[in-house]
Image (cartoon, grey):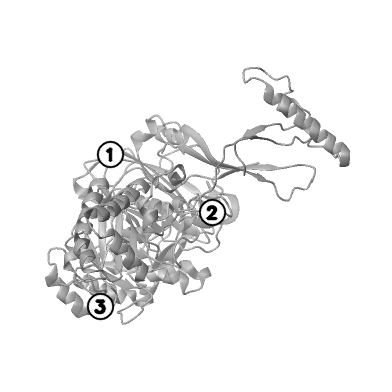
């Protein structure tokens, strides 16, 4: 692509059939017209017939295109597709010379870290997931999504507290799609700074030589995390250190931790169990007096994986007031002499929680790498359901609360229950709030069971819906399934929208159910005749003024098999605590009640938000414009050009829609 000069696009008559010299003469005439058009002042009106007024078979497309040189940087763009990509930094020189550029804007997280309860700083044991899979930067590197049939994804966010993206490059910047998805669920995201082998030792000798050199590295790490919008670093020095380098390492950690805390509130710096205070590379599989100097200089330690229970017992006395800052490593691949791993990872978690430590689950992508890709969802569900007992959940604590249960990938793209596009796609930035998952099939009580999972076979919006399947035992008339844990101070009026469909032969009724903290002390208005004991609201009629306002704000749609219900709760002095779906038998008898419920969307809004003015889209812009020649044109005399560009919009976040998580790629013929 040459710069600094103008190019003219050939004009073609859509219905033309010119060949040989005649077509060449026509081309020259068209170019001459363009030259004349280019000479016109901008304020002067052209006498050329307006495009839309031409006969259909003689429409002429004339456009003068001017561009400046814009070499694509391999670090920021995929050179095959020109699409923006997430990236890592591979050398110390690259790190120290890093500074934001226009191309970097794609990698900035658009989703701030959501509030949660309990906060990350609480003393309860935490769960860290360290994602190390196939070298990193797979389909997830494509910021605007990829067409992938079976890409790895993660959606058990309510069960974890910290997500670390790991690769063996010097500076691993988490792909922005992971930061967007994690932040939407109140999960903090860490990048990785790692040195290894002989090259790593040389890097350490360079940047740990003195105060100025290690501060320069720390300052760049802080700037990178702050600019791209993630929450800290895992520091992994897996090479020997000289006496002078290891002496400066605690100072480096203290300075980095201090600067991160100032620059990014609630950020974390975690040290990996590797070198000793002597500089020797020797994994301890525990926190002890040989590596405690590093632990004391930052927010926590991630231990190596080859521990036994006696290691845990010793650590209790090593850091009695900071047990939750010790992240005991669990290698899901079960490499070496370890407890658990693979589908026995729960055995390791059981011991870790017994001694009140945090857990660091390393490489759970094993379920994807070492099993059939087509069965990924089943393996992912099985792996995490075995751990639920040992994974304390955290609660959503903000409104509006909106989700269509999209998991960031699918076989189709749906909008309001209709298929908009038929293709496999993957974009974790599009993932919406995920529920608590239930799998009681292996522990059925009186032949009753419940199983919830994301399902791509049908959806309301995005790529999947929540499928709730089960059996109501003959001894019970209903079953309640907890979908979300929330801790939200209730506004005076809460508007709820619920979209679902029943599949197969299901003689059941469906209702949403809410629990409040100290419910007997809450007061309820009699607007929807809510029984205070159950908090199960009655649906609003279509004539209700609140329902009409919601329809006016969010539009109407054709349900096509889906059912839509809206509710109004009027509360005082309450704290919303849980959201359930209640399935009850229409005619309770001595028979089991089978059901298959698909939930398309749940919205919980402050009713006042329906009456506030919506902000407008501001400052639209378009960047990275690329003209592409069309492929597969039936009429070879017609030249097709496609505009491939990235629109950037400052988008409002209306109460009826979640904020989109990524810039979209437009391909406009």
Quarter of the picture holding the C terminus? top right
- Residue 36 in the image: x percent, y percent? 73, 24
Q: Which residue is rendered at x = 31% and y = 74% of the image?
A: 346
Q: Give the vertical position of 81 relative to 105 (above or below).
A: below
Give the mark toward the camera: 3 or 2: 2
The residues bearing labels 1 and 2 have C-alpha atoms spaced at a distance of 47 Å
State the residue position of label 2: 78
**Element under disc 1:** loop
Few, some or many C-alpha atoms within 10 Å of disc 2 (few <14, some 14-19, many ≥20)? Answer: some
Q: Which residue is rendered at x = 17% and y = 68% of the image?
A: 292
Q: Give the vertical position of 451 relative to 259 (above or below).
A: below
State the residue position of label 1: 491
Q: Which residue is rendered at x = 75% and y = 34% of the image?
A: 11
- Residue 556 in the image: x percent, y percent? 52, 38
Residue 481 sits in quarter: bottom left
Closest to the observer: 208 or 178? 208
State the residue position of label 3: 307
């Amino acid at each position: 692509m040459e710069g600094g000069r103008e190019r003219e696009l050939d004009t073609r008559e859509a219905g033309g059939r010119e060949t040989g010299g005649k077509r060449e003469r026509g081309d020259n005439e068209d170019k001459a017209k363009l030259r004349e058009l280019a000479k016109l002042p901008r304020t002067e009106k052209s006498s050329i017939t307006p495009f839309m007024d031409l006969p259909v078979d003689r429409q002429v497309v004339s456009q003068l295109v001017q561009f400046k040189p814009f070499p694509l940087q391999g670090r920021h763009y995929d050179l095959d597709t020109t699409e923006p990509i997430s990236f890592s930094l591979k050398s110390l020189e690259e790190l120290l010379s890093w500074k934001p550029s226009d191309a970097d804007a794609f990698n900035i997280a658009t989703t701030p870290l959501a509030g949660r309860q309990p906060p990350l700083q609480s003393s309860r044991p935490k769960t860290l997931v360290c994602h190390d899979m196939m070298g990193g930067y797979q389909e997830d590197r494509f910021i605007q999504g990829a067409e992938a049939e079976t890409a790895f994804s993660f959606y058990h966010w309510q069960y974890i507290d910290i997500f670390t993206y790991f690769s063996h490059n010097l500076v691993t910047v988490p792909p922005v799609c992971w930061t967007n998805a994690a932040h939407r669920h109140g999960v903090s995201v860490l990048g990785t700074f790692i040195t290894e082998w002989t090259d790593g030792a040389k890097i350490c000798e360079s940047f740990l030589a003195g105060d100025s050199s290690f501060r320069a590295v720390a300052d760049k790490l802080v700037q990178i995390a702050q600019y791209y919008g993630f929450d800290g670093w895992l520091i992994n020095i897996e090479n020997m250190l000289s006496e002078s380098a290891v002496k400066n390492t605690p100072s480096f950690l203290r300075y980095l931790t201090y600067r991160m805390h100032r620059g990014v509130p609630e950020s974390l710096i975690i040290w990996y169990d590797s070198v000793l205070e002597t500089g020797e590379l020797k994994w301890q599989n525990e926190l002890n007096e040989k590596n405690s100097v590093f632990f004391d200089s930052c927010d926590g330690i991630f231990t190596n994986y080859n521990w036994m229970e006696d290691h845990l017992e010793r650590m209790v006395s090593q850091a009695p007031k900071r047990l939750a800052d010790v992240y005991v490593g669990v290698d899901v691949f079960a490499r070496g002499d370890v407890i658990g791993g693979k589908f026995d990872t729960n055995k390791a978690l059981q011991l870790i929680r017994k001694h009140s430590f945090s857990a660091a689950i390393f490489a759970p992508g094993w379920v994807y790498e070492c099993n059939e890709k087509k069965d990924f969802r089943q393996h992912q569900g099985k792996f995490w359901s075995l751990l639920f007992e040992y994974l304390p959940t955290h609660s959503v604590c903000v409104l509006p609360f909106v989700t269509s249960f999209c998991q960031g990938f699918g076989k189709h793209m749906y909008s309001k229950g209709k298929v908009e596009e038929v293709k496999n796609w993957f974009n974790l930035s599009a993932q919406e709030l995920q529920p608590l998952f239930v799998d009681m099939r292996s522990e059925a009580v009186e032949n009753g069971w419940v199983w919830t999972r994301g399902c791509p076979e049908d959806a309301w919006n995005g790529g999947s819906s929540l499928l709730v399947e089960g059996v109501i035992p003959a001894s019970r008339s209903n079953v309640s399934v907890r979908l979300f844990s929330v801790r939200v101070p209730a506004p005076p009026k809460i508007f709820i929208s619920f979209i679902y469909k029943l599949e197969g032969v299901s003689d059941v009724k469906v209702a949403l159910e809410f629990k409040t903290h100290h419910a007997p002390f809450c007061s309820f208005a009699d607007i929807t005749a809510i029984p205070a004991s159950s908090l199960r609201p009655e649906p609003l009629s279509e004539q209700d003024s609140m329902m009409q306002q919601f329809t006016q704000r969010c539009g109407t749609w054709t349900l096509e098999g889906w059912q839509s219900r809206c509710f109004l709760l009027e509360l005082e002095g309450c704290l919303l605590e849980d959201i359930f779906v209640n399935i009850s038998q229409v005619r309770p008898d001595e028979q089991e009640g089978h059901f298959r419920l698909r939930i398309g969307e749940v919205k919980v809004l402050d009713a006042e938000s329906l009456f506030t003015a919506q902000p407008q889209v501001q400052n639209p812009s378009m960047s990275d414009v690329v003209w592409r020649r069309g492929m597969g044109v039936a009429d070879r005399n017609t030249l097709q050009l496609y505009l491939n560009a990235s629109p950037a919009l400052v988008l409002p976040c209306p109460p009826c829609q979640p904020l989109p998580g990524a810039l979209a790629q437009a391909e406009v013929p």
